[in-house]
Image (cartoon, coloured by chain):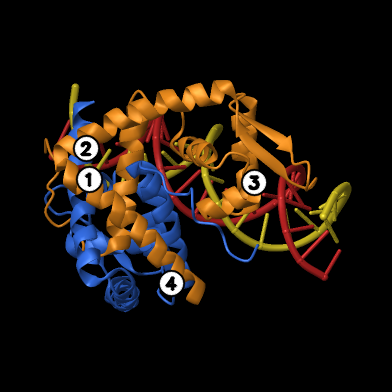
Chain colours: A orange, B blue, C yellow, D red
Amino acid sequence: MPHEINLGTMTDMLGVELRIAQILADRVFSGSSAAKLAPGHFTVLSLIKLNPGINQSSLARCMHLDRSSMVPILDQLQEKAWLERRRNATDRRAYSLHLTRKGSRMLDNSERQVIALESRISEAMGPNNRDKLLQLIQQLQVSLKGIESDQ
Amino acid sequence: MPHEINLGTMTDMLGVELRIAQILADRVFSGSSAAKLAPGHFTVLSLIKLNPGINQSSLARCMHLDRSSMVPILDQLQEKAWLERRRNATDRRAYSLHLTRKGSRMLDNSERQVIALESRISEAMGPNNRDKLLQLIQQLQVSLKGIESDQ
DNA sequence: TATTGTTATACTCTATAACTATA
DNA sequence: TATAGTTATAGAGTATAACAATA
């Protein structure tokens, strides 16, 4: 059996398809040259880049994780000297998270390779489809947040 | 801070947005009444329903997991008497996987509740958008498989 | 030789609950 | 009292390597 039969693996449920797509995406990311960064680490550094100075709890909420789950992730990133925890001057309970110069360089480098990967996706599925997909995934997030806060 | 500020949490990278959407989707699924089934279990049972008699290795490949990772998942499902491993008559190395009556009922029941959830998503983001999103996610899977087999 | 399923083992990710320090 | 961060701990989920049975 040289190739997998693809019939019958497609459901009509978003959750199922999303899960499979994400396993695949992680695998492709990890197999690419962007993989000096773990997939989850890439996400964290990207969010800190977009929100410099964000604190740990807010970052956890962005990713829909528990505060305590952020700690070992941030420990690892700090150990690699890719981010700094700076005591927040006005609220001394909190840390402000910032990328180090080294972390910025690492992220920029990975981003370039992710962009190369995204280009291949754009090529494969068509650039309009790729952009539409991104927009719809973000819309889905908003919808899910609405449903979550209801239930 | 009653609600999370949503600005600055959207990247323009599929991988990042996919990851966050999936964490959210799992959480919403788990918080819903469909949650008698773990999100991963639901995926497995759905795929067996679509491919009755599939063997463990093929199922693992469908989900892009290692064969050995399927074992404990299937053990759990078998323990709950939701699926059967039947020795394949023609290839006695392999098991054919089948839902039990009980497993079918359980899955049908969860599917109904997933469909209800999907309806809420359709309502929230518009039915056309929801359908388009599903189609694009499946297209993404195909594209990712192409890229994976290259690298 | 190759493949199917399994085991042993280890690693990663995540959550809960309880703690501390600050607010 | 409430919140930010941490710790201890436990539970999932996953992979790698090696094995037995079968092809």
Q: In x, y percent, where is residue A29? A: 34, 33
- The residue where tag 4 is placed is A147
Residue, disc 2: A121
Tag of residue B81: none
**Amino acid identity at mark 2:** Ile
Badge nearest the viewer, 1 or 2: 1
The residue drawn where x is 14% and y is 54% is: B89
Neighbour tally class for label 3: few under 14, some 14-19, many 20 plus, Cα within 10 Å:
many
Question: Are the residues under badges 2 and 4 in a single subunit?
Answer: yes
| Identity of the residue drawn at 61% across and 48% down | A69
Provide the residue designation for mark 3: A56
Tell me residue B63's x, y (percent): 28, 48
* Pointer 4 or 1: first along the chain: 1
Chain letter of mark 4 equals A
Along the polypeptide, which appears first: circle 3 or circle 4?
A: 3
Q: Which residue is under mark 1?
A: A130
The subunit carrying tag 2 is A
Question: At which x and y percent is residue A11?
Answer: 21, 62
Q: Mark 3 belongs to which subunit?
A: A
